[in-house]
Amino acid sequence: MAASADCYHCGSPVPDRAPWHIELDGEKHPLCCPGCEAVAHAIVEGGLESYYRFRTELPERPDEQTTARADTWAVFDDPELQASFVHAEDDGRVHATLAVEGITCAACAWLIEHRLNALSGVTSSAVNLTHHRLRIAWDPARIKLSRLLAEMAAIGYVAQPYEPDQAQKRLQREERMTVRRLIVAAVGMMQVMMFSIPIYFAGRDGMSADFYALFHWLSFALATPVVLFSAQPFFQNAWRDVKTRALGMDVPVSIAIGCAYLASAWAVITGDGEVYFDSVAMFTFFLLFSRYIETRARRRNGQSGNALSGVLPTSATRLEDDDSERIVPANRLAEGDRVLIKPGHDVPADGVIEQGESSLDESMLTGEYLPVTRCVGQRVVGGSQNMENPLVIRVTRAGANARVAGILDLTDRAFASRPRLAQMAARMAHVFVLRLLMVAAAVAVVWWFIDPSRMLWVMLSVLVVTCPCALALATPTALTAGHGQLRRRGVLVTRADALETLSAAHRVIFDKTGTLTRGEMQLVDTRPLTDDLTAERARALAAALEARSEHPIARAFAPFRDATLSAVDIHSTTGQGLEGRIDGRRWRLGKPAFACHDPASPNHARPAAPDDGQWLLLTENAAPRAWFRLHDAVREDAADTVAALKAHGLEVELLSGDTAAAVSELAAALGIATWHAGQSPENKLARLQTLQAEGESVAMIGDGINDVPVLAGADVAIAMNGATDLARTRADAVLLSPRLLRIAEAVEIARATRRIMRQNMVWSVCYNAAALPLAAVGVVPPWLAAIGMSASSLVVVGNALRLTRWQTRPAPSVSSPSPVAA
């Protein structure tokens, strides 16, 4: 099959002469790897080939480690483990909600549901396409949960229990209730306005007394649920503020709504006085809308229930006293337990190696993209991945005592510094509201002596005019418009004040691996050392040697696999390389000292690498044959992003856990003058706190577990599109696309949002300053005050909507430093 063909299942390029394929409708379709072949055959043989006709997007490529994890599904049959997420029903059946990876379109949901519903014992299954969750019910006497998970894995979807935490559940309940209150307020406002407009235009003399009274009574009936139900949070918060003596915005809001409602009700009952139910309903709706925006932002910033699922594995292989293996939940491990970690599996807890030697990928914790070698007596960290050989470790710290938990503690301490801004805002609001109430009380006292019959309505006019409706909308409306503009550009803001903080940032700090780089090893240069070996042949030979390896370097050679070449007698030497036989000849790939080692001539000269960088040597019977240069490719727009940020007047810095040589090379290529290598999570947080102590506002961009503390401690944190769950929950914004230039655009939009917020604030203050004296002297009646308040709000909203049409400036173009594969 042609090398240019695309995989029928996932769309990846198919290697030259690849044997993998699937037959469908009498036609043979190429596949790129055994994983896609297994998934495709499972789909077609299950009678679900219509999936390929329905799908609108290609699925993710099957994880090569899924097969390695297949023997761990049995752990989910443990009753103690199921107790936390499997719920019993009245008829003896059970149900659970699972988080599903790999869903891309509606055809995926169709495939999962049809696959599961065809199983004997499954009573129902439904996929939530928006949140990538599956609710499934089954009879535990007829089918086990492990079978369900294995069936999903067979068609390419890995599932795990979804367990939202209590904070997330509470925020969801609050949001649902806020929506109900908002709907009641919106319906009430529209209906009350329908009855109020004829009264305003016709007046008491322009309609019959019966209709005049009827419209007032109908308005009274419609405004009552708005006040008693929709406005209930305002009264509750006001009562709380009064008891704690910390006056907030809800105090004048509650006084205005309550007094206007009671006075209007009295006027309807007695038939004497002014009625302003429309103002009450409209005022309540506008304020509830702003509160709804805040609730949405807080909900998105809540912790996800699966925050730890991407760090520590769910199960572990524990060795009993007789060396027998037993798969147990990872949260059951205790200090002193012996655990077997097979190649491709994750380390479930911190420990010390008792048997074996292997390379471990610790990039999720340290930022190092190259695996590190660990041998007997050395410590391993929970969450790292075993790459080559089996290991037996003795657990030293598990669960809440593990290294990952320590990083989370750092995160919590970093978050503890945030409430200072909130306290300052609360103090300012307290002073503002207190002065506002004093002015209203003074006006009431003065009018008591001037004209007691007008005292209440003049005081209401003052309260309505000074009610912070426009002031309350000034920030949320601008933020909402800014959030929407960024969402369309691929940036999801998860904290309401992130844009304002980003607009005031002085410095942007980047992580390296997975942020400025793609986080994937790539082959960028091939240099044959003999005339009889072409670069293509050399890559194919190296790919054959690496075909069975889980090492990141093996993934760099995967695209160059030749199905006609296979290596036998493969042996891996940890941290050095591997060797095997191809067509009867011994080939080695790895570090020069290892690749050229010849027992018959141990002291012969070894060739030097062509230049700086990550070079591997391919040898045939210890004779050098080709050099390969590997590189963690820089993102295509990384240089343009750095240049654009500098053009906006921001300082750019690079913090990485990688080696000094790799960090300095990248910093020089991108034009970053300030960089720090070998940084642990503690070092990164300390650097951030030093900058903040010097008065700088810092924006942090990262993606890994090692970035979580510094993301939490930064003034504004942005997580990459491929970031871990923990990094996302600690970030103030998440990139939905891999384009780094979105960060520069976010800075520009954030500054535009801040300008509009300031304009809205100035307008609100000027409006209140002009309207307050007029209301205080009795010139502005309550109905006119309500109209003026509404008009002021509309001006604020209209000004904020200008952000929806905002166009960013073209970024300065810089040639990309990313190397191109040979």
Image (spheres, rainbow, N blue to C red):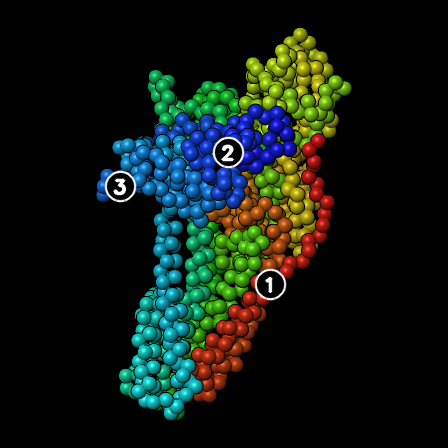
Quadrant housing residue 630? top right
Residue with the mark numbered 3: 88
Above or below, comparing residue 354 to residue 258 in the picture: above
- What numbered label is drawn on residue 805? 1
The crowd level at tag 1 (other Cα within 10 Å; few <14, some 14-19, many 20+) is few
Whether residue 533 appears in this view of the structure is yes
Q: Earlier in the sequence, mark 2 or mark 1?
A: 2
**Residue depicted at x 68% and y 29%:** 629
- Give the spatial CA distance, label 2 vs label 3: 43 Å
From the viewer's perspective, tell me whether residue 247 is left or right of residue 684.
left
Q: Quadrant of the C terminus?
A: top right
Q: Give the amino acid at mark 3.
A: Ala
Q: Position of residue 200 (x, y in %)?
A: 42, 85
Depth check: 760 or 5 in front? 5
**Residue depicted at x 37% and y 18%:** 323
Q: Position of residue 69 (x, y in %)?
A: 44, 29
Residue with the mark numbered 2: 25
- What numbered label is drawn on residue 320? none
Q: Give the amino acid at mark 2.
A: Asp
From the viewer's perspective, tell me whether residue 761 is left or right of residue 336.
right
Q: Give the amino acid at mark 1.
A: Arg
Q: Mark 2 falls on what kind of element?
A: loop
- Give the spatial CA distance, label 3 vs label 1: 52 Å
